[in-house]
Image (tube, rainbow, N blue to C red):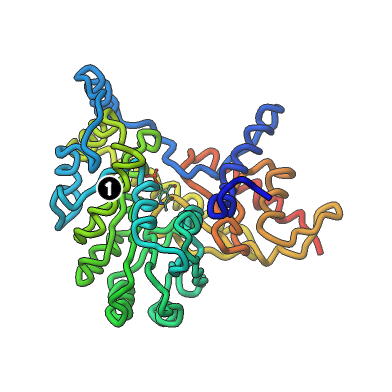
Amino acid sequence: MTVISKHIASLAESQSLAMARRVNQLRQQGVDVVSMTLGEPDFDTPMHIKQAAQQAIADNYSHYGPEKGILPLREAICKRMQGYTPEEIIVSVGAKQAICNAVMALVDEGDEVIIPTPCWVSYSEMVKIAGGTNVFVKTTADADYKLTASQLRASVTGRTKLLIVCSPNNPTGSVYTKEEIAQLVEVLKEHPDIYVISDEVYSSIMFDGTKELVSEGMRELRERVIAINGVSKTYAMTGYRIGWMACHNKEILKACTVLQGQYLTCACMVAQKAAEAALDGSQDCVEQMRCEYAKRRELAISLLNEIPDIRYITPAGAFYVFPDVSKYYGKRFCNQIITNSDDMANYLLDEAHVACVAGSAYGEDKCLRLSFATNEADITEAIKRIKNALSLLYK
Ligand code: PLP
């Protein structure tokens, strides 16, 4: 019998954090581990943003602020996101909190939330906090790991309240096209009580000219879409913890403002000033980082192409590639049989000293998530080690 509430007791620990802990332990023992687990930019926050944070401290941004965030920041966000007014923005402690606010504001006990998998680890846990029911819909590599209109239609029930889409996607890197979004809109038009959270935190990291955003493609559903973004991935500011929701629905905005006012007051004022400088300043740093990720993506893909019997989709965005390694399941190394993605991730860590995150964490046990938010030398070494380790497995 636990003293912990049933919703909180049901939460899972983050597998990527557990993996990071194992990597640290091994490194402390002197093992040379190459990691492709990082879920954040490996770049430093650009200098002009750091200076803005220092200036904010000097200017005494040390008091409570408005619960929705300071107006100049909300104005700066509106310049980067088309079609919103500052009243339609709520600044939070990272995109994570913005998503959690939206889920808690919308989901009642027993409401169903459709989450296409593979997906980021936290959505389902947020739904559990709200007492909702996760309805996972498995997408396939053949469909570029994207939810199809027919899958969406088949998963809707009388209890469906919310759909959470992430594009560019963590962990698959897939990005919905205009046509695919339009097809989802057609289904959602048949169900006027379903809301959509569009997680767009990787929107600045897209490749090959791709640029579609789900919230923009869903403009027709104006009152039902909540767009989520933040400065973490775009400006290498994960530790500043600034994210936001943009939404036209006054009722949702009001609920999230009250909710946030009660349990947060406001996001860190110094970090808000830094985020304002990031959004208002030159965007050259964003493009430089994007180009760097693009080069690393090419490198990672060219190396993965040399490994037999794996399959992946070329990521159109974000900084992850999600190869299917399941053809190696059932094989063994020294009497240890690899039966799933956790076994595989552990084998790679123990034998090849390469860290990656098991696909099971994201709802796809055939795959591993490799992050290319790391330097080219590490990407080369990690994938070389993976290739070698896979070649040592035998039936
Ligand atoms: N959404 C996705 C898909 C993510 O991968 C992450 C972070 O890893 C977040 C949201 C949270 O971002 P933030 O740092 O803004 O809270």
Q: Residues within 10 Å of mark 1 (few under 14, many from 20)?
A: some
| Label 1 within 8 A of ligand 1 by Cβ | no
Identify residue type, mark 1.
Answer: Val
Residue at horizontal 81%, vertical 54%?
A: 333
Count of all numbered marks drawn on residues in the image? 1
In terms of depth relative to the viewer, which is nearer, 116 or 36?
116
In terms of depth relative to the viewer, which is nearer, 105 or 213?
105
Residue at horizontal 22%, vertical 59%?
A: 251
Q: Which residue is mark 1?
A: 258
Q: Is residue 319 left or right of residue 324?
A: left
In terms of depth relative to the viewer, which is nearer, 8 or 326?
8
In terms of depth relative to the viewer, which is nearer, 318 or 352?
318
* Residue 13 image position (x, y, % from top left): 59, 47
Q: Secondary structure at mark 1?
A: helix
Q: Is residue 146 left or right of residue 326?
A: left
Asked if 91 appears above or below 11 in the picture, the reply is: above
* Residue 3 image position (x, y, % from top left): 62, 45
Q: In terms of image quadrants, where is residue 41?
A: top left
Q: In terms of image quadrants, where is residue 206?
A: bottom left
* Residue 301 in view: no
Asked if 320 appears above or below 312 in the picture, the reply is: above
Residue at horizontal 46%, vertical 61%?
A: 314
* Residue 48 image position (x, y, % from top left): 24, 28
Question: Considering the image in quadrants, where does the C terminus appear?
Answer: bottom right
Q: In terms of image quadrants, where is residue 363?
A: bottom right
